[in-house]
Amino acid sequence: MCVVKMTLGWPGGSEELPMVDVYIPMMKAAAIISAGQLRLFEALAAGPLPAGRLAEAIGASEVGVTHLADFLVALGYLHEDQAGYSNSRRATRWFTVGGDVDYTAGLLWTAESWGLMGQLTEAVRKGAPEKSLWSSMQERPHWGPIFSSYMQAFARHLGPDLLARVTPPEGARRMLDLGGSHGLHSVGFCRAHLELESVIVDFPSALTETEAMLRREGLSSRITVRPGDLLHGDWGTGYDLVLYLSVAHNQTPEDNARVLRHIGAVLRPGGLLVIHEYLTGAPLDVYDAAFRLTLLTETATRTYGLEEFAAWLDAAGFEPPVRQDLEPREKGSLLLARRR
Ligand SMILES: C[S@@+](CC[C@H](N)C(=O)[O-])C[C@H]1O[C@@H](n2cnc3c(N)ncnc32)[C@H](O)[C@@H]1O
């Protein structure tokens, strides 16, 4: 325990103990993921619990929970006092239902996709994964809903920024949500703008829960889904507003150029395209560089820069995009582009 606390004080391992830089991040990720799988943070949402009662609440052993909780205390995710263990502000905020955004689905997805990183070396050798994330998802049908729930957490986080910063064009009625998955962005726009109707295009694996959600929300008549590959499918035409949110990094440059040309063809003059992306820059920051490595092992694609988007948009008949960087920076950027 004492060793753990000491090592956490070191920013990135040390000359003498280089494996700390590998061992502690691995254990940190494993412990937070386990807490998510066991719903440990949720069990503490109502107040502190001693180890025995916490173990009972989550159906685990007391010895196991004690070791896990002690490490989470060292990491700053839990506190411990005479009443037992309690959530830190950070754990409450990000990993409980009552917090700002519950990213537990992100922990569950990371647990599922953990094995993909075992293929990193091979992906580096070959410049691409053995199999794309989308093919792996077809082989593991339970992945689609977990990935989609993780994307929902991101969407809950991003939704208020999007609605505050995007005004649909005058008289807008028809919206297209490309790679819309869980449907939350379509729901947000259709709730905020009562005259809007939306079409969501995504792979069938990403849409397994979407129609049921739209029925629950009473929006099935205004929001419809079109399962399919957006690179090859027909999306309909005559749109006033198109969302292309966090989808470009999953496409090659050639496919993005093609998709944006297709968007230009189905969007009316004066119509608005909203892109959300993690724009790359030079030098790469650590988050961007890590994400690019993830994309190499998942889809053999990468993040793109403003200049690349501007060139694709110009060729697709758009005015120069307006860039809006979100806070914190890890939330990415919006590009708003109007059809000429
Ligand atoms: C990172 S998620 C973003 C989801 C959603 N737009 C959001 O912002 O929360 C990317 C989505 O694009 C979809 N997607 C990627 N490539 C696609 C393709 N070729 N055809 C259809 N959907 C695709 C994925 O299935 C996934 O739902």
Image (tube, rainbow, N blue to C red):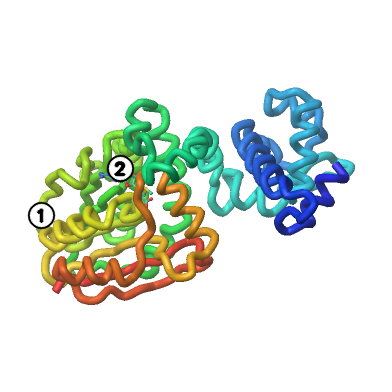
Nearer to the camera, 182 or 132: 132
Q: Nearer the viewer, residue 117 or 15?
A: 15
* Residue type beneath disc 2: Gly
Q: Which residue is mark 2?
A: 218
> Which badge, 1 or 2, comes first in the chain's sequence?
2
Q: Residues within 10 Å of mark 2 (few under 14, many from 20)?
A: few
Q: Which one is in front, 26 or 174?
A: 26
Residue 339: x percent and y percent?
16, 70
Q: Locate residue 42: give its quadrant.
A: top right
Ligand 1 lies under 8 Å from the Cβ of mark 2: no
Q: Residue at x 41, y 48 (%)?
A: 295
Query: How far apart in space, not on screen, are marks 1 and 2 (Cα)?
Result: 25 Å
In the figure, is residue 236 to the left or right of 288? left
Q: Residues within 10 Å of mark 1 (few under 14, many from 20)?
A: some
| Helix, strand or loop for disc 2 | loop
Query: Total number of numbered labels?
Result: 2
* Residue 227 vs residue 311, the one in the foreground: 311
Residue 98, given in percent of the width and then of the height, sits at 59, 47
Q: On the rendered structure, is 124 left or right of 340?
A: right
Q: Residue at x 22, y 51 (%)?
A: 198
Q: Residue 260 at x, y = what percent? A: 20, 60
Quarter of the image holding residue 81?
Answer: top right
Identify the residue shown where x is 85% and y is 45%: 3
**Residue 100 shows in the view:** yes
Query: Which numbered tag is attached to residue 3?
Result: none
Disc 1, SS: loop
Q: Amino acid at mark 1?
A: Thr
Q: Which mark is residue 237?
A: 1
Does residue 79 sit above or below 145 in this rendering?
below
